[in-house]
Amino acid sequence: MQISTLSSSHLGLPTVRQGTDAAAPVQSKPTETTAAEPNSPATSSSFRQILSQYDISSITPRQFSEMLQKLHQSGTISGQQYQDLSQIRTDLDASGVQPDEEVDLVKFYSQKLNKAQGAAAAAQTKSSSLPAGQSQSLTTMQQRLEWLRKVSTIQSDPAAGINSLA
């Protein structure tokens, strides 16, 4: 799979656009003007450097929050993306994961998404459709999981860099 960049607008996270229906799926928008240009060497270098300090297959919630803060401060993720990804920390806290307890984020979020999909399937058998909020929630969870998988791939194969994922 070829990805042009993994910073800013190409993270695949939802961003809120003015004038959109909150229940409708949202698409990524270009980076905020305060963020570095997505294809700039400085952004790619900063992103790679920050990711090299962490291992999301064995990371504490506190370290994850620190990583997100560094990515945001460096301009490699927008304010909206920072807020969206911070929900992962909220989910960890809600699941009882302690701030200094190591967790595999891809595994954690895969299990969380599987449970949510199972609940959605059960709800759908009772009524012929999913509530709009539940559908949006599943989409958002899937986007967060995809971001975590991309980061995991980069961390497991640093030679691949940000611009190419196998």
Image (cartoon, rainbow, N blue to C red):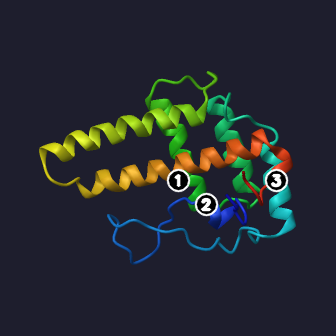
Residue 61 figure quarter: top right
The image shows residue 4 at horizontal and vertical percentages of 72, 66
Residue 94 figure quarter: top left
Q: Earlier in the sequence, mark 2 or mark 1?
A: 2
**Label 3: element kind:** loop
Residue 74 figure quarter: bottom right
The image shows residue 76 at horizontal and vertical percentages of 73, 60
Q: Is residue 158 above or below residue 98?
A: below
Quadrant of the snapshot with the N terminus: bottom right
Q: Are marks 1 and 3 in contact (CB under 8 Å)?
A: no
Q: Is residue 159 above or below residue 34?
A: above
Q: Which residue is mark 3?
A: 161
Q: Which residue is mark 1?
A: 84
> For the residue marked with disc 3, what is the amino acid?
Gly
In whole angstroms, how far apart are the C-alphas of marks 2 and 1?
9 Å
Q: Which residue is mark 2?
A: 79
